[in-house]
Image: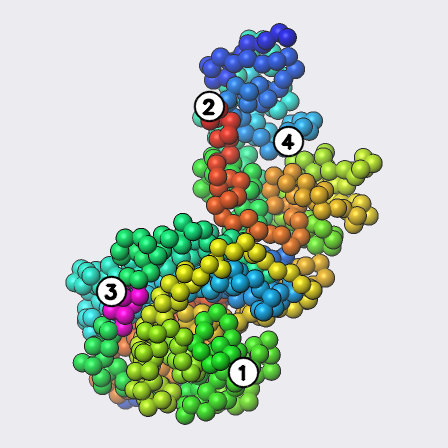
Amino acid sequence: MAKKITIEPVTRVEGHGKVTLHFDDRGKLIQSRFHVVEFRGFERFVQGRPYWEAPVLVQRLCGICPVSHHLAAAKAMDLVVGADPDSLPPTAEKMRRLMHYGQMLQSHALHFFHLVSPDLLFGVDADPAVRNIVGVALKHKDLAVRGVLLRKFGQEVILATAGKKIHGTGAVPGGINKNLSPQERDSFLKSPAPLNADTMIDWAQGALDFFKSYHKKNKAFIDGFAEFPSNHLSLVRKDGALDFYHGVLRAVDANGHKILDDIDYRDYLRHIAEEVRTWSYMKFPYLKSLGKDKGWYRVGPLARLNTCDFIPSPRAQKEFEEFRAYTSGKPNSMSLHSHWARLVELLHAAEVIKELLLDPDLQGTVLTYRGRKSGEGIGLIEAPRGTLFHHYRVDANDLIAMANLIVSTTNNNEPMNRAVHWVAQNVLSEKPQITEGMLNQVEVAIRAYDPCLSCATHALGAMPLEVSIVDPRGLVLDCRRR
Amino acid sequence: MTEIKFTIDGKACTARPGQTIVEAAKANGVYIPVLCRYEGLKPAGSCRICTVRVGGRPVAACTQPVAEGMVVENATPELEDMRRAVVEMLFVEGNHLCPSCEKSGNCELQALAYRFRMLAPRFPFQWPLRATDGSLPKIIMEHNRCIQCLRCVRSIRTEDGKGIFAAQERAGRMRIGVDPELAARLDDETARKAMDICPVGAILRKEVGFAVPIGRRKFDRAPIGSEIESK
């Protein structure tokens, strides 16, 4: 009898999603889909609001990386008040960077330690009662403590720059509303271990070493799981360096050939379009030059390390060289190598935080700049999960008339669907019995992309897991919850 | 000058002749919450958040002068609950979305909600449909947040004494209107005064939102009323 399996909701990701898998009479996969089932509509209700409210309002999309939305909106509104990136005061630019790299540290730590490490430490088919962050805390206390404190340090950096750990108000159109006091700076640099920048760098290196040693012992799984070629897209600094805050758009294909390079992101609409499919609230973006079928791309840590030429901090650069050497300099298309790339970025974020803290510009007093106003602003940023687009039009009364957000997870929609398909095809198809561990592998594939489904459809929530097996008439034959 | 003796919740207090209960309470280190009252303006007695009991009868403390031997009940559980109810009614009657409001931290209504530990209002939200008016050059009229205290109507005037704000319509449809010609000539200082005098985020100066960081806003430093109670 033909079967339909539904994994709903998907766990250990942010937001509500579900997976449906259709099998024929012999248990052979017919179709797999990763749906995002929530809808919020921020793009609509930001309309009619004063433009300076956007950075504070739109960040409410998310509780994990609100700083990304806060800064992307602020960057867009910089252009509305006539402050192009070159005219932003150094204090403002560097405070925003500090905020953003603090966020990168906390979000990447959260993803690796809290969401992913249970799969690695206990195995993808371990008992779900153990395979979670509480299990990690009980069995691997040191690792759990490091995860929690790395995240705490990042959150403290956000507090000092944005005014609150979650949903602050630091970035305003044309700049920032505070500088970093010498006391705040010293608390990050000189506090007794572990909560200082040097320890964070060492711990980030430790997390990376842990992953690399796991990789060595589990090469076949880490390399082969959900491996498929794709294009990759990210911002890079003008000189090709990895940069999370600002840069130009670059896209490379599976062989490393540049599809887009040195593109001013304000022209994104000339290069990127979004396709709507009826079964998901999440759109499917693609590169116009390659069309809907071939133009999809990955974003996020893996894509960023595939597009950039180098990393501008010494320890992360050394790790980057090793990462690139593993695929002989070609783009890396192994889904689980996202974790490797994410930890290289964790190390880079920790190094940049220290470098910024030592910069006296953070104590500057010129915080904003305003030039000639315009009715449109576009702000891009590399969020922890990938490239984030914010685009607004503002009317003559200073109220927002149009908003378009393409969030990181939306950019990864097709890759996540491909990853789910890979698992359905290679792990589940034509198997006599489908176990919980096998279904968890579907989620392992999705989790590698660190999706934030709330942001993607602009929704929020936590999720248990429900799996149901349904016959072609829609009759539920089996249902399991956890 | 004759000194008037009276009590608030049993505390012996003194007042000068003509002082209202709110003024005298303040001078004696007792906080009575106010919203429509503003220092220097003739009291209106419209919001009723300052309601106290005198001789068992509820009165507006911002308009009632103190009399010799007066026994005022102020911070009783019943009156505190009534005040919380007033705050709740003001919240449900408009669209008060603190998370994205630039007046957050400087808003008297929000500060009172914290003081009275309002968690969720007991009344159903009305979700009125009100437009936000950005057509004036210096200010935005955010009618969603207006609590109709009339502080702007009573205080903001041109140099030659003409009122810029006025109450329009009545009852549920009442809203604060603006003289478009006078408002078009509003200078920065008057715009600043109008925003400051508004207890909520209904009058906003354009383009300066969120300039004060969290931690340095008025009620970040000290909760509402504490400046009087700490005396």
> Can residue A440 be found in the magenta stretch?
no
Q: Residue A132 carries which label?
A: 3
User: Where is residue A466 drawn, in percent x and y?
Assistant: 31, 68
Which is nearer the eye, B115 or A36?
B115
Observer able to see residue B42: yes
Q: Do labels 2 and 4 share a chain?
A: yes
- Mark 2 or 4, closer to the camera: 4
Instruction: Establish whether labels 1 and 2 are both on one chain.
Output: no
Q: Nearer the viewer, mark 4 or mark 3?
A: 4
What's the distance in space between the residues labelled 4 and 3, CA to CA?
56 Å
Q: Name the residue under label 1.
A: A262
Labels 3 and 1 in the same subunit: yes
Colour logic: rainbow
User: Is B209 above or below relative to A90?
Assistant: above
Mark 2: amino acid = Thr
Would you say the residues marked 4 and 3 are in contact, meaning their CB atoms lie under 8 Å apart? no
Three-letter code for the amino acid on which mark 4 is drawn = Tyr
Q: Is residue A353 left or right of residue B3?
A: left
Gap in angstroms between the C-alphas marked 4 and 1: 57 Å
Q: Is residue A11 visible?
A: no
- Vertical comparison of A74 with A448: above or below: above
Residue located 45% across and 73% down the image: A243
Q: Mark 4 points at which residue?
A: B38
SS type, badge 2? loop
Q: Reading the chain from its start, which is encountered first: label 3 or label 1? A: 3
Of the 4 image quadrants, the one containing the C terminus of chain A is bottom left
Mark positioned earlier in the residue sequence (2 or 4): 4
- Amino acid type of the residue tagged 3 in the rendering: Asn
Both labels 4 and 3 in a single chain: no
Which is nearer the eye, A32 or A381?
A: A381
